[in-house]
Every structure is written in structure tokens, then in C-alpha cells.
């Protein structure tokens, strides 16, 4: 589900990924993993620690504190899949893709305990 934010929640011309989460949320963890793995720059904001962040999430989620909620510039995605997030970045902030490391240059993770590093 995605929506555009309005009013005070707009970031203006700034284009960045803001990842609103709540500790212990399995949906947040599921989205955070591919976001980090693919090297997209994101600022993570805990809505339990920041009342203004919780209000911003409510402003685009029909009054609910639905997480994960992701803002890409002024565009909001409420509980998106990684595929939806990637499509939104490609549409609204393609310059962020240029900031990521190519997958082949990132170190491979060991699949412990099944594979040992040499």
C-alpha cells in the first residue's frame, strides 16, 4: 500500500529513504534485511522513541501506527514489500541506486555452519 504524504510530513526536495519501525516487528525485520543487503542508504527511525515519527506514520496510514512505513522523499509506502520499495526508489530516487556498492564488490557472507571461510 502506498500513498503520498502532504503538509508537514513532506520533505520538500530532499530525497532519502526514511525507514520507520518498531522494535520486535517481524515485518520491519523482513524488510530491513534486503534493504541493508542491497546497500540502499536508509535512516531508521523508531516510532516508539519519537512521538513526531509516530505522528508522521499515522498521517499516511489512516491514523494507524503501521510499520514498516517508508518515505522516499515525499512519497510514502505503508508496509511495502521489498519489491515495492525497490520500484519506488527507481521511480522517485534513482540517484540513491548510484550510491550503492555493486553486489560483486561486497564481501560474501559465510553460510555458517554449512560453509567455512578459507
Image: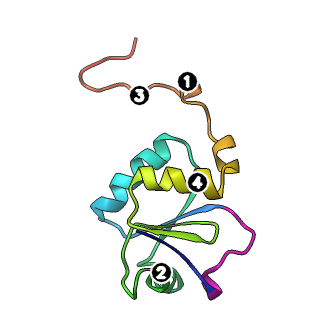
- Secondary structure under the numbered disc 1 in the rendered image: helix
Spatial CA distance of label 4 from label 2 is 18 Å
Query: Pointers 1 and 4 in contact (CB under 8 A)?
Result: no
Query: Pointers 1 and 3 in contact (CB under 8 A)?
Result: no
Disc 2 crowd rating (10 Å Cα; few below 14, some 14-19, many 20+) is many
Q: Which residue is mark 2?
A: 60
Q: Which residue is mark 4?
A: 89
The magenta stretch spans which residues? 7-15
Q: Which residue is mark 1?
A: 104
Disc 4 crowd rating (10 Å Cα; few below 14, some 14-19, many 20+) is many
Spatial CA distance of label 1 from label 4 is 21 Å
Q: Assign the N terminus to one quadrant of the image.
A: bottom left
In primary-sequence order, the first of circles 2 and 1 is 2
Left/right of residue 64 with respect to residue 89 in the rendered view: left
User: In the rendered image of this protein, does residue 83 appear above or below residue 105?
Assistant: below
Instruction: Examine the rendering and report whether any part of residue 41 can be seen.
Output: no
Instruction: Examine the rendering and report whether any part of residue 57 can be seen.
Output: yes
Amino acid at each position: 500500500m502506498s500513498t503520498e504524504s502532504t503538509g508537514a510530513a513532506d520533505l520538500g526536495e530532499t530525497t532519502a529513504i526514511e525507514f520507520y519501525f518498531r522494535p520486535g516487528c517481524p515485518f520491519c525485520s523482513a524488510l530491513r534485511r534486503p534493504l541493508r543487503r542491497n546497500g540502499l542508504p536508509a535512516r531508521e527511525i523508531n516510532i516508539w522513541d519519537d512521538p513526531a515519527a509516530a505522528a508522521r506514520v499515522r498521517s499516511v496510514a489512516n491514523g494507524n501506527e503501521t510499520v514498516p512505513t517508508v518515505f522516499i522523499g515525499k512519497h510514502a509506502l505503508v508496509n511495502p514489500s521489498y519489491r515495492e520499495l525497490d520500484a519506488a526508489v527507481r521511480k522517485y530516487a534513482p540517484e540513491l541506486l548510484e550510491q550503492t556498492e555493486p553486489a560483486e564488490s561486497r564481501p560474501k557472507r559465510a553460510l555458517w555452519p554449512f560453509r567455512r571461510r578459507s
